[in-house]
Amino acid sequence: MTKAWTTRPERPSDVAAIRAINAGAFPTQEEADLVDALRADPAVWLPDLSWVAVAPDGTVAGYALLTRCHVGDIPALALAPCAVLPEHQGRGAGSAAIVAALDAARRRGENLVLVLGHADYYPRFGFTPASGHGIRPPFDVPDENMMALTFDPAHPVPAGTIRYAAPFGV
Ligand SMILES: CC(C)(COP(=O)(O)OP(=O)(O)OC[C@H]1O[C@@H](n2cnc3c(N)ncnc32)[C@H](O)[C@@H]1OP(=O)(O)O)[C@@H](O)C(=O)NCCC(=O)NCCS
């Protein structure tokens, strides 16, 4: 069942809920710690690109984050992490948060978003294999899991190796 999710950029009062979403959705605290480290890094944290999906009862259940990365020296965005409280998964909260974050990036004039993730989930948002643009990650992953999304087909897309924000530790 799909609920009527409300989406909005994170507020200071959402920080604990966002931590709980990431801690609940992933097997370890690693992603929750990563989000806190990214938020503390002004070089990569972008205002209004950290999005939550809120249930009608006010539960902050879904989360999607875009932070600054580069392909070579050209700025791009990394979509990571995406997470939903386990009891709310499969009801559209993840999609709602991701679509809202991507729309905000588009409005901000960004053109390239990269994601490392499930090859059967992210194509629905328009992602295709990054290798098609000559973009590669700085680590070994199956080609289908490293994906890219561009907003403006007329805009040139940089080729090269992704440089993730320092808190990613890669
Ligand atoms: C992945 C995640 C963010 C998706 O959010 P969600 O709200 O559960 O998903 P939505 O309701 O928006 O979309 C449902 C679809 O996602 C698919 N999906 C959900 N979790 C998935 C997963 N781990 N792998 C592949 N597909 C997944 C479902 O199969 C469903 O597909 P369908 O529409 O074809 O039936 C969420 O399930 C989650 O937090 N999972 C655990 C953490 C995780 O794996 N994060 C992503 C890292 S790449």
Image (cartoon, rainbow, N blue to C red):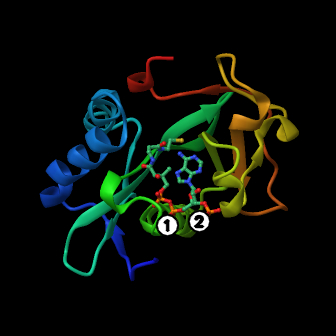
Using the image, determine if residue 155 lies above or below residue 160. Answer: below
In the picture of the structure, the residue carrying the numbered disc 1 is 104
Q: Residues within 10 Å of mark 2 (few under 14, many from 20)?
A: some
Provide residue 87's location: percent of width, then percent of height.
31, 58
- Determine whether, in the image, residue 158 is placed left or right of residue 59: right
Q: Amino acid at mark 1?
A: Ala
Q: Residue at x 21, y 68 (%)?
A: 59
Q: Quadrant of residue 154?
A: bottom right
Provide residue 65's location: percent of width, then percent of height.
42, 50
Q: Residue at x 15, y 49 (%)?
A: 16
Q: Amino acid at mark 2?
A: Arg
**Helix, strand or loop for disc 2:** helix
Q: Residues within 10 Å of mark 1 (few under 14, many from 20)?
A: some
Q: Residue at x 66, y 62 (%)?
A: 125
Provide residue 110's location: percent of width, then percent of height.
60, 56
- Determine whether, in the image, residue 25 is placed left or right of residue 13: right
**Helix, strand or loop for disc 1:** helix
Whether residue 85 is visible: no
Whether residue 6 is visible: yes
Q: Does ligand 1 reach within 8 Å of label 1's beta carbon? A: no
Q: Residue at x 65, y 29 (%)?
A: 73
Name the residue nearer the viewer: 144 or 37: 144
In the picture of the structure, the residue carrying the numbered disc 2 is 106
Name the residue nearer the viewer: 140 or 90: 90
Using the image, determine if residue 10 lies above or below residue 134. Answer: below
